[in-house]
Image: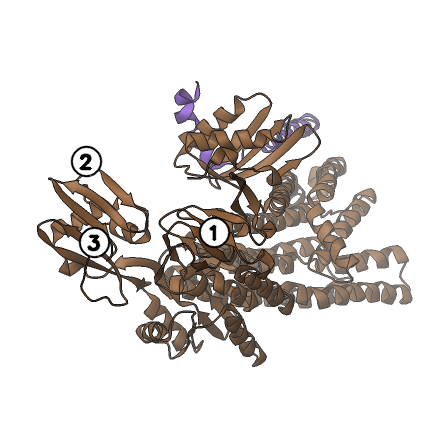
Chain colours: A brown, B purple
């Protein structure tokens, strides 16, 4: 095994100054809260160390004072406690995200506090006339309202102002521009009203608007944050580091810094970080993530390996033959970058509407002002009417139209284990016309499962499972499910890359490869293990990758909806053809490289189709980026999950159809919401321009349109409950 | 109605106190890991070395 104490983590230490350092680690092997407290306590007992471990994401943040190299000692301590750690790279993006979430939460609580208090005052103000209440009391209540509302609008409105300002600076408009204008104008006009002892102020409307909008923003941010964390917690070696041996010392290096000729130490279960040649050791490789190939390869000294393959059974040493820039992995990454540039930035529906809405509304207000001035009205009064136009067109309902639906939709999906990673994924998903699937790990489960269970005597299966308990090889793992707890006390020795051996009742029992068990029967292409026991005939265990339970049903539904599902695979022709037939797909292509997959998708785009790509392998990452919208299972590689817009958990492929239905339903509701709010505006604006809208009518109308939009979004839940 | 002069400030002060408490809780990271904190009471005994 690698001498972990010698692993150098220094490239991953952030130093704020010479004395203060910080490091982010992903800790493996945390099973319960006890582990969390143990780790925190052990580290915090050191002088000047502050450690914080988040249980749900397994992320550890350690800060310490003194020498930067102390980071290695701290990591070593964790290793000696039995926890594996990996440096965590995507820290910066994540921190910005978290602080933005906190910022929204603070704004939302302030707005919530203000709304609660405003409601108390508003009830009195709206239900009682000045005659009953007395002028002085009403003035007091108005001023108290202003005291609460103005700081709130200033403080809690910042997310909108910032976003609006950023859009205006880039000479664009988005929904936040009219929202910001409305917030500022409504507040200003209310102040004007109470200064002139007017009857009504709109502080309550402003504060409630801010609060409602912020709830939507915050929930949206949170759901997306959760989805991202789920994808990132699987961060593994590929996007991070490799263990390099130089002069007998093991050192962790970012994969990007790998050079030709370096020696890599690859432990069992690790991914190989770069293309190279095996120098020492013999093992088995799983290349399925890279090629979609569902067979394992035997390798020994001298075999060529490709970055991205997983080393299964024994540690090996690999000499890097291609600097990382030239490796297959780097090619995939380059393809992804290219695909990302090719994909024009998607403009959300709400922003498209805002693009027209904002100028129209502001021109109308200006026209109103000029019209009344030319008609001979005093400019103050004309300005007041113009402001009413702006307030009545206040985009409460319009601003809420998308977020409320999105929040309801994403929580519905989240409950089913479908995580939205980008906000506009649902909008894009609703419009797709073609679906592409990858094979291994997407249509199939990507894990071998025992196929000939019926042919194996139960006692021998139990024996095989008891032996397999001692190994983490994928074929052994497929047997773990059959472990009935028999033969608890056997001592099993693992022969790396070959199999397992034990002595039971004085007889040697072997579970392993054909060679290890000395089987002479004719070999075929199937995945197999053999169980031999002295004095009994050898037993063959055959494994195969199974289809996801509802793969065929999902493809059938997609075909019925004229989305013509197609299969893109890197696997061999015969295997792909069989899988395609099993799930009922006519359109398939086999033996594709990552580049071919991208080409297929781009060819589709040129025909004007909008594509959904569902895939899990590294070879799909570029295709996922190139596709109009993409999904990947939670079992996929992190790099693939990062490329995908939607990540789904569990074995069921019906996540694809569920997401599709929710997306379409949500999009229909969004459109209805826009219609509701625009219809409201078309009724209210002419009245406001004519100066016919009383403040009470304005307030009630605004609230009514917002409530209509919020209630309409809730219909998604109702539809959902009978859909599945 | 004169009572409003006392009651409104009292109501507002109480509200602001609550808001302040929440901000404090947020700032000290009490919402950062909901899973872990729920277990702290159980882990306490094994906690102390």
Foreground mark, 2 or 1, reads 1
Residue A79 in the image: x percent, y percent?
45, 33
Relative vertical location of residue A677 with respect to residue A703 in this rendering, above or below: below
The residue sitting at 29% across, 54% down in the picture is: A475
Give A19 or A623, whichever is nearer the viewer: A19
Left or right: A695 in relation to A83? right
Regarding mark 1 in the picture, which secondary structure is present there? Answer: strand
- The residue indicated by pointer 1 is A318
Residue at mark 3 to residue at mark 1: CA–CA distance: 28 Å
Mark 3 vs mark 2, CA separation in Å: 23 Å
Mark 2 belongs to chain:
A
> Is any part of residue A563 visible from this angle?
yes
Of labels 3 and 2, the one closer to you: 3
Picture coordinates of residue A296, whole percent (x, y)? 35, 60
Instruction: For label 2, count other residues whose C-alpha is less than 10 Å away and answer few (under 14), some (14-19) or many (20+).
Output: few
Which image quadrant is residue A33 in? top left
Subunit bearing disc 3:
A
Q: How far across and how far down the image is residue A503, in percent?
A: 16, 41
Residue at (68% x, 25% y) in the render: B6
- Vertical order, A656 against A60 (above or below): below
The dot on residue A489 is 2
As measured in the structure, the alpha-carbon distance from the residue carrying label 2 to the one carrying label 1 is 37 Å
Does residue A240 appear to the left or right of A138 in the view shown? Answer: left
Disc 3 and disc 2 in contact, CB within 8 angstroms: no
Could you tell me which chain the residue with mark 1 belongs to? Answer: A
Which of disc 1 and disc 3 is earlier in sequence? 1
Res A486 visible: no
Q: Secondary structure at mark 2?
A: loop
Question: Which of these two is toward me, A39 or A142?
Answer: A39
């Amino acid at each position: 095994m690698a001498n972990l104490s010698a692993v150098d983590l220094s490239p991953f230490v952030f130093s704020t100054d010479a004395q203060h350092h910080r490091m982010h680690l992903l800790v493996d092997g945390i099973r319960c809260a006890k582990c969390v407290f143990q780790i925190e306590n052990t580290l915090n007992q050191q002088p000047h160390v502050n450690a914080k471990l988040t249980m749900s994401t397994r992320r550890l943040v350690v800060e310490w004072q003194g020498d930067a190299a102390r980071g290695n000692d701290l990591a070593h301590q964790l290793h000696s406690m039995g926890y594996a750690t990996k440096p965590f790279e995507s820290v910066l993006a994540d921190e910005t995200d978290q602080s933005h979430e906190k910022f929204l939460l603070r704004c939302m609580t302030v707005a919530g506090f203000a709304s609660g208090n405003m409601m108390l005052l508003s009830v009195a103000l709206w239900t009682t006339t000045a005659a009953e209440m007395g002028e002085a009391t009403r003035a007091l209540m108005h001023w108290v309202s202003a005291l609460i509302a103005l700081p709130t609008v200033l403080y809690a409105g910042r997310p909108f102002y910032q976003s609006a300002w950023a859009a205006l600076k880039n000479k664009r408009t988005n929904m936040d521009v009219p929202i910001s204008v409305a917030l500022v104008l409504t507040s200003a006009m209310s102040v004007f009203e109470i200064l002139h002892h007017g009857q009504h102020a709109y502080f309550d409307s402003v504060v409630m608007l801010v609060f409602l909008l912020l709830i939507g923003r915050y929930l949206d941010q949170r759901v997306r944050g959760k989805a991202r964390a789920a994808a990132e917690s699987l961060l593994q070696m590929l996007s991070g580091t490799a263990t390099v041996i130089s002069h007998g010392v093991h050192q962790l290096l970012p994969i990007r810094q790998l050079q030709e000729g370096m020696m890599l130490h690859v432990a069992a279960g690790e991914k190989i970080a770069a293309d190279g040649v095996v120098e020492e050791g013999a093992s088995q490789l799983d290349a399925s993530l890279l090629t979609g190939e569902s067979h394992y390869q035997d390798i020994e000294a001298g075999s060529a390996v490709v970055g991205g393959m997983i080393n299964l059974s024994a540690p090996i040493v690999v000499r890097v033959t291609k600097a990382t820039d030239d490796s297959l992995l780097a090619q995939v990454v380059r393809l992804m970058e290219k695909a990302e540039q090719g994909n024009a930035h998607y403009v959300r529906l709400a922003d498209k509407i805002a693009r027209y809405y904002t100028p129209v509304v502001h021109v109308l207000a200006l026209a109103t002002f000029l019209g009344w001035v030319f008609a001979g009205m005093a400019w103050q009064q004309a300005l007041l009417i113009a402001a009413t136009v702006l307030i009545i067109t206040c985009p409460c309902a319009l601003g809420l139209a998308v977020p409320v639906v999105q929040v309801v939709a994403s929580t519905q999906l989240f409950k089913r284990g479908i995580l939205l990673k980008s906000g506009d994924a649902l909008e894009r998903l609703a419009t797709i016309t073609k679906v592409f699937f990858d094979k291994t790990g997407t249509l199939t489960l990507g894990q071998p499962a025992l196929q000939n269970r019926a042919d194996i005597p139960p006692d021998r299966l139990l024996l095989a499972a008891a032996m397999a308990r001692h190994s983490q090889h994928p074929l052994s793992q497929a047997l773990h499910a059959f472990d009935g707890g028999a033969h608890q006390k056997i001592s099993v020795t693992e022969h790396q890359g070959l199999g397992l051996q034990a002595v039971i009742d004085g007889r040697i029992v072997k579970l392993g490869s054909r060679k290890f068990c000395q089987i002479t029967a004719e070999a075929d292409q199937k995945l197999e293990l053999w169980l031999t026991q002295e004095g009994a005939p050898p037993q063959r265990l055959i494994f195969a990758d199974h289809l996801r339970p509802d793969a065929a049903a999902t493809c059938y539904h997609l075909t019925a909806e004229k989305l013509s599902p197609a299969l893109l695979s890197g696997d061999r022709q015969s295997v792909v053809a069989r899988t395609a037939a099993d799930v009922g797909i006519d359109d398939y292509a086999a033996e594709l490289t990552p580049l071919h997959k991208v080409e297929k998708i781009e060819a589709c785009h040129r025909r004007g189709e909008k594509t959904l790509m569902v895939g899990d392998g590294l070879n799909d990452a570029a295709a996922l980026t190139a596709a109009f919208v993409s999904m990947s299972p939670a079992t996929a590689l992190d790099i693939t999950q990062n490329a995908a817009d939607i990540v789904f958990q569990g074995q069921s492929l019906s996540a694809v159809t569920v997401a599709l239905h929710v997306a379409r339903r949500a999009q229909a509701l969004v459109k209805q919401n826009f219609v509701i709010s625009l219809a409201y505006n078309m009724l209210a604006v002419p009245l406001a321009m004519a100066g016919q809208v009383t403040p009470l009518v304005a307030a009630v109308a605004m609230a009514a349109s917002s409530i209509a939009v919020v209630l309409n979004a809730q219909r998604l839940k109702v539809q959902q409950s009978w859909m599945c | 109605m004169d009572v409003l002069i006392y009651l409104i400030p009292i109501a507002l002060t109480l509200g602001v106190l609550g808001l302040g408490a929440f901000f404090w809780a947020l700032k000290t990271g009490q919402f950062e890991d909901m899973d872990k904190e729920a277990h702290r009471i159980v882990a306490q005994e094994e906690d102390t070395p």
